[in-house]
Image (cartoon, rainbow, N blue to C red):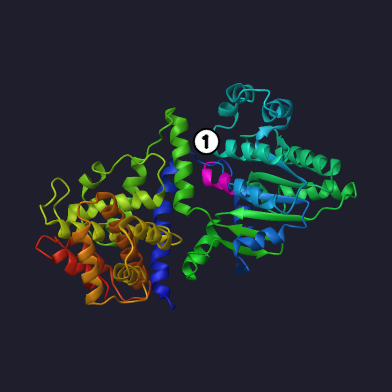
Amino acid sequence: MTYSKQRLREIAELQRKAVRRIQTDIGEIHPSPSRKYIQRFSEEFDTFECVCEPVEILHGIAQSNLVWIGDYHALTESQMYVVRLLKELTQTKHRIALAVEPIFARNQEVLDLWMSGKLPEQEFLERIRYYEEWGCEWSGYKAIFETARELGIPVYGVDCQPRNDMRSIGRRDLGVARRVARLIEKNPGRTLIVVFGESHLAAHHLPARVRAILKRKRIPVRESMILQNIDALYWQLQEGGHGDARAVRVREDCYGVFNATPIEKYESFRQYLYKCIEEDSSGDWTLLVQTLSEIMTEFFAIKKNESVVSHMPALDGIPLSAATEEFARCLHQACRGELEKRTARAIQDQFFVQVIEKGLGYFCSKLLDSSRDGIEPLAERVLSEIGLNDRLAKAIELLVDPGKRPGAQHFAALRSAIESKAGKQKAMRMLSQLLGYALGRRLYKAYLQSRISRKEIQALFNDPLNTPNRPLECYRELHQF
């Protein structure tokens, strides 16, 4: 399937615009005292060799006795990747240890007590001064520790002071390197997985210091590295039409994985900073809504409506895709003049209005996270909920497939199902969600192939859909793209 390079660049620029606005806000709160250290990391990992399947990473690290995993501390999904990797790795490797940054090496005895179940969680956090010394969301790291406990993997704290002084980052790296090297020296036949902040993992930073120590001691080491959500690699995938790729091989024994967009990545850090300065666990999610409002209304040349933001539900902790869907839904209602009060419609017309709303929401979410999908599993659940029959199943199959165009008989089968299931609200909600998501995916692919324009999407937002049968007619028209 060929995508327009111009459209791919447009979508990447839309995402970049959102990231720049978030980064500007971050810079106002948290100006970095030194960029050179971080810049070296960014310059080293600015391209990749090829797209690969995630399973290739497991094969690639199979022979390593030292595996570095880059961690973006504020992003919980970054830690959850470590959880998944540990579970997968222990299916083939049995001698594994884990070294982590959030715990100082001096607190190893306290960590051992908690890992062995001899210390309550709250006392453990207090004794290591977790929130004072580290401060990032505990849930992701807790999941790592609990998984290691379940799998019988020993865990070691390897960090040391000065943690918050970039001017002394080399001294800190040397202290960590000595601790990592001792763990390898103590048990060289074991695979040590080191989860550490990504910027420390440039070749001449922490890994180089470990290699130098082991070389002096003549201890062999086979290294692998897994980086997460690196910006430059993400943008290359986007502009190359590989937005759904989940992994790349950067170079030999070095891989990149993607489990979050740059928007989610930097938004997690913005939320972390707001929690720190406000001493409020809720952060400030209205900033994300404002960012979405600014970039999406500009992208579609729709007049900004401040009331859209005020009508958004609470977003605390929900994924970017869900937040974007909610924004698009509210924006669509505002453009139709129904944000305050919905127009009375027949049940069938209201059903298709909901489908179009969900379609626009899914389309907008794909613009900001092109890896999103999962429609086919939803189709299976919908069919089991509403009751399977061959005529309806065939209609849904064609409506869900973006490469096919359903005919009049398929829309008739759908209409019949809606009329017969009108009283089953759960079934109808699921069906409207499925058809909406499938419509959004169809529009997204049509946009990438330049078969539908932004102006036509803008017109869809502004269509009032307020005459009898117009929502169904509009839904049918959109399947011609």
Residue 223 position in % (x across, y down):
76, 55
Position of residue 159 relative to residue 333, above or below, is above
> Residue at 65% across / 44% down in the picture?
196
Residue 368 position in % (x across, y down):
40, 58
Position of residue 231 relative to residue 184, above or below, is below
Front residue of this view, candidates 286 and 30: 286
The residue carrying pointer 1 sits among few (fewer than 14), some (14 to 19) or many (20 or more) residues within 10 Å by Cα, namely some
**Residues shaded magenta:** 74-81
Looking at the figure, which quarter contains the N terminus? bottom left
Residue 135 position in % (x across, y down):
55, 32
What's the magenta bit mostly, secondary-structure-wise? helix
Residue 137 position in % (x across, y down):
52, 35
Position of residue 85 relative to residue 363, above or below, is above
- How many numbered tags mark residues here? 1
* Horizontal arrangement in the rendering, residue 105 relative to residue 310 (left or right): right
> Residue at 37% across / 76% down in the picture?
403
Q: Is residue 75 magenta?
A: yes
Query: Which residue lies under the disc numbered 1?
Result: 137
Amino acid, disc 1: Glu
Q: Quadrant of residue 120?
A: top right
Q: Is residue 12 magenta?
A: no
> Residue at 56% across / 56% down in the picture?
230
Element on which disc 1 rests:
loop
Can residue 222 be seen here? yes
* Horizontal arrangement in the rendering, residue 102 relative to residue 16 (left or right): right
> Residue at 63% across / 50% down in the picture?
85
Looking at the figure, which quarter contains the C terminus? bottom left
